[in-house]
Image (cartoon, rainbow, N blue to C red):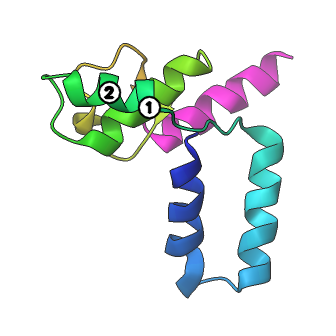
Amino acid sequence: MIQMSITDIFYILRKQFSVSERKKMLLDLCDFIDVVGIHKNQIINALNDTEFTDLEDRIQIECAQIINAHYIITRNITDFPHSPIPVILPEDFFKIIEEKSAND
């Protein structure tokens, strides 16, 4: 996950959860995910990609490639039409986790 997403999540949850609750949630999330910083090279790659119009989405792909992510999880699959990494809905990700847990 790109570090900007952490701040986005913190902001989005503000109406439903207190600051301390949001911090706890994100700390718990950080135990489960990798957080990737963005560097100049990723920004340049994203800006030079003519197939994408949404810079933030393209930077998400750059960050996912850095960590060899298996998936990009989003509610907006159509925003990633040319992603080299599979893009899935959150509910599909949870199904994958449930299936993996059942098989372990």
Residue position for label 1: 40
Badge 1 density bin: few <14, some 14–19, many ≥20, Cα 10 Å: few
Instruction: Give the image location of residue 79, x and y in percent.
Output: 24, 38
Question: Residue 55: in sight, yes or no?
Answer: yes
Residue position for label 2: 44
Q: Nearer the viewer, residue 21 or 34?
A: 34
User: Which range of residues does the magenta coloring cover?
Assistant: 88-104
Instruction: Give the image location of residue 89, x and y in percent.
Output: 43, 38
Query: Could you tell me the amino acid type at mark 1?
Result: Lys
Badge 2 density bin: few <14, some 14–19, many ≥20, Cα 10 Å: few
Residue at 75 percent across and 64 percent down: it is: 25
Query: Could you tell me the amino acid type at mark 2?
Result: Ile
Circle 2 SS class: helix
The answer to whether marks 2 and 1 mark residues whose Cβ atoms lie closer than 8 Å is yes
- 10 vs 71, left or right, is right
Question: Which residue ends up furthest to the front in the rendered image?
Answer: 40
Residue at 59 percent across and 48 percent down: it is: 3
Q: How many marks?
A: 2
